[in-house]
Amino acid sequence: MRARLEALIDEMLDGRILLGEALSEFEKLYIKKALSRNKQNLSKTAAILGVHRNTVAKRVAFYQKQERPISRTKAAGR
């Protein structure tokens, strides 16, 4: 696993991915995968991740907010 991770890090560094972007994307995917394995159960997911349930809920809400497309009226400044 370490070799695969190091290869991915090399690829990200070559692509000039900033540390903040890399950490954020990793966290988002890690939580998403853990939620999937636990059938979207926040409490079970939080226990497996070793964080409080509220932390998982806040992160999920944050990532969902980021993924929402901007509506046409907001984009046009109306």
Image (tube, helix red, strand yellow):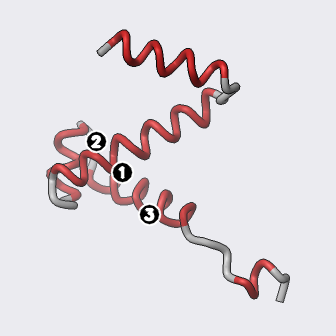
Amino acid type of disc 2? Val
Q: What residue is rendered at 52% in x and 19% in y?
A: 9
- Give the image location of residue 48, x and y in percent: 18, 40
Q: Secondary structure at mark 2?
A: loop
Q: Secondary structure at mark 3?
A: helix
Q: Mark 2 or mark 3: which comes first in sequence?
A: 2
- Give the image location of residue 12, x and y in percent: 59, 24
Q: Mark 1 or mark 3: which comes first in sequence?
A: 1
Amino acid type of disc 3? Ala
- Disc 2 crowd rating (10 Å Cα; few below 14, some 14-19, many 20+) is few
Using the numbered discs, state the Cα–Cα distance from disc 2 to disc 1 in whole angstroms. Answer: 7 Å
- What's the mark number on residue 55? 1
Relative depth, front residue between 70 and 43: 70
Q: Using residue 19 as the reference point, say whether residue 26 is left or right of it.
A: left
Residue linked to disc 3: 61
Q: What residue is rendered at 25% in x and 38% in y?
A: 49
Within the image, what quadrant is residue 54 found in? Answer: bottom left
Tag 2–tag 1 contact (CB < 8 Å): yes
Mark 2 or mark 3, whichever is nearer to me: 3
- Disc 3 crowd rating (10 Å Cα; few below 14, some 14-19, many 20+) is few
Using the numbered discs, state the Cα–Cα distance from disc 1 to disc 3 in whole angstroms. Answer: 10 Å
Relative depth, front residue between 45 and 15: 15
Q: Is residue 58 above or below residue 49?
A: below
Within the image, what quadrant is residue 19 found in? Answer: top right
Mark 1 or mark 3, whichever is nearer to me: 3
Amino acid type of disc 1? Thr
Residue linked to disc 2: 51
